Image (cartoon, grey):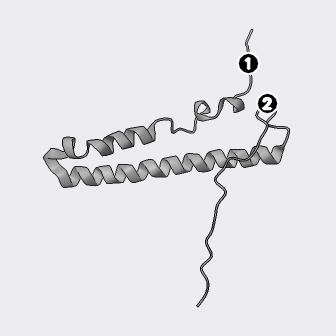
Amino acid sequence: MGRKAKVEFDETPPEIDLSNPYGDPVAMLEYREYLVREKWIQIETAKIIRDRLLWCYRIEGVNHKQKCRHLVEQYLDSTRGIGWGKDARPPEFHGPKKISE
């Protein structure tokens, strides 16, 4: 048949000088891709927990408040801090504030 090779992924963030992130544009793009990948993992994890929670609500019926409480807590914890707005980015990428006169 054939050999099954084990695929390994580098899950560590790339090395970047955060004091001057645009000094190395390749490292900057790799770091941005790393942040986006981690964000998508958080979003998909929240979706899986949400699906389990909906299933629990349907199965448990009137007892869902006691039986599904752990899933509610997991879902709320997994959705905290998920967002694509400027506030969800690391502070290093916000840039200096513009002062209007």
Of residues 89 and 13, the one drawn nearer to the viewer in this rendering: 13
Q: Is residue 81 left or right of residue 11?
A: left
Of residues 67 and 44, the one drawn nearer to the viewer in this rendering: 67
Q: Earlier in the sequence, mark 1 or mark 2?
A: 2
What is the secondary structure assignment of the residue under circle 1? Answer: loop
Vertical placement of 71 versus 97: above or below? below
Residue 19: image tag: 2
Q: Nearer the viewer, mark 1 or mark 2?
A: 2
Q: Is residue 12 left or right of residue 25?
A: left
- Residue positioned 71% across, 30% down in the render: 92
Q: Is residue 18 left or right of residue 54?
A: right
Q: Amino acid at mark 2?
A: Ser
Query: Residue 6 appears at what percent x and percent y?
Result: 61, 72
- Residue that lies at the very extreme toward the bottom in this rendered image: 1
Residue 53: image tag: none
The local crowd at label 2, few if under 14, some if 14 to 19, many if 20 or more residues have their Cα within 10 Å, is few
Q: Which residue is mark 1?
A: 98
Query: Residue 69 appears at what percent x and percent y?
Result: 26, 41
Dividing the image into 4 quarters, which one contains the N terminus? bottom right
Q: Amino acid at mark 1?
A: Lys
- Residue positioned 34% across, 39% down in the render: 73
